[in-house]
Image (cartoon, rainbow, N blue to C red):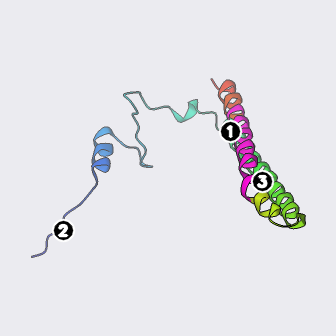
Amino acid sequence: MNQRVRVTSPQTRLAQRRGADAKGRLSHLAGRPPVPSSAIDLDAAENALRRQRRLAVTTAGALLSALAVLLTAAALTPGHLGWILLFFVPYPILLALAALHVRRAERIEDTHHGDGP
C-alpha cells in the first residue's frame, strides 16, 4: 500500500524545534525572549514606512527626470557624442541618487528608532 511521508526542509524542522509562532516567524531569536506586541509602537512603524515609501517615489521620480533630460540631451547632441553621453553620464547620476536615497532612508530609520521606547 502507498504510505504518505511528510517531507520538510531542515530550516522548517529547526524552526519547529525552536518554537515558531503562527505566522512562521521564530519567536526566540538568538536566545532572546519574544517581544510582546504591546511593546511595538505600530503608529511609529507605519509612519516610518509611509515616509520611506514617499522617499522611494521621490527617488524614482528624480531618476526618471534625470534620464529624460539625459536622453533629450543625447538626441540633441550631434554625431557620436550623444552615444558617449549615454554610455558614461548615467552611472554617476545613479550613484549619486543611490547615495542620497540610502542616506535619507537611514535618517528616517534613525528618527524612527529614536522615537521608540
Q: Secondary structure at mark 2?
A: loop
Find out whether residue 83 is within the magenta segment. no
Camera-side residue of 17 and 36: 17
Q: Which residue is mark 3?
A: 63
Q: Residue furthest left?
A: 1
Q: CA distance from mark 3 to mark 1?
A: 14 Å
Q: Which residue is mark 2?
A: 4
Mark toward the viewer: 1 or 2: 1
Task: Identify the residue shown where x is 69% and y is 26%.
Answer: 115
Which residue position is annotated with label 1?
Answer: 102
Q: Position of residue 103 (x, y in %)?
A: 71, 35
Amino acid type, mark 2 = Arg
Kindly identify the amino acid type of the residue bearing the numbered disc 3. Leu
Say whether residue 93 is magenta. Answer: yes
Q: Position of residue 60 (x, y in %)?
A: 76, 53
Q: The residue under label 1 is which amino acid type?
A: Val
Q: Which residues are magenta?
A: 87-107
Give the x, y percent position of residue 17.
Answer: 28, 41
Going from the N terminus, do you reach mark 3 or mark 1 first? 3
Mark 1–mark 2 CB contact (< 8 Å): no
Which quarter of the rendering shows the C terminus?
top right
Task: Say if 25 sits above or below 30 in the image.
Answer: below
Where, by quadrant of the figure, is residue 28 drawn? top left
The residue depicted at 37 percent of the width and 43 percent of the height is 20
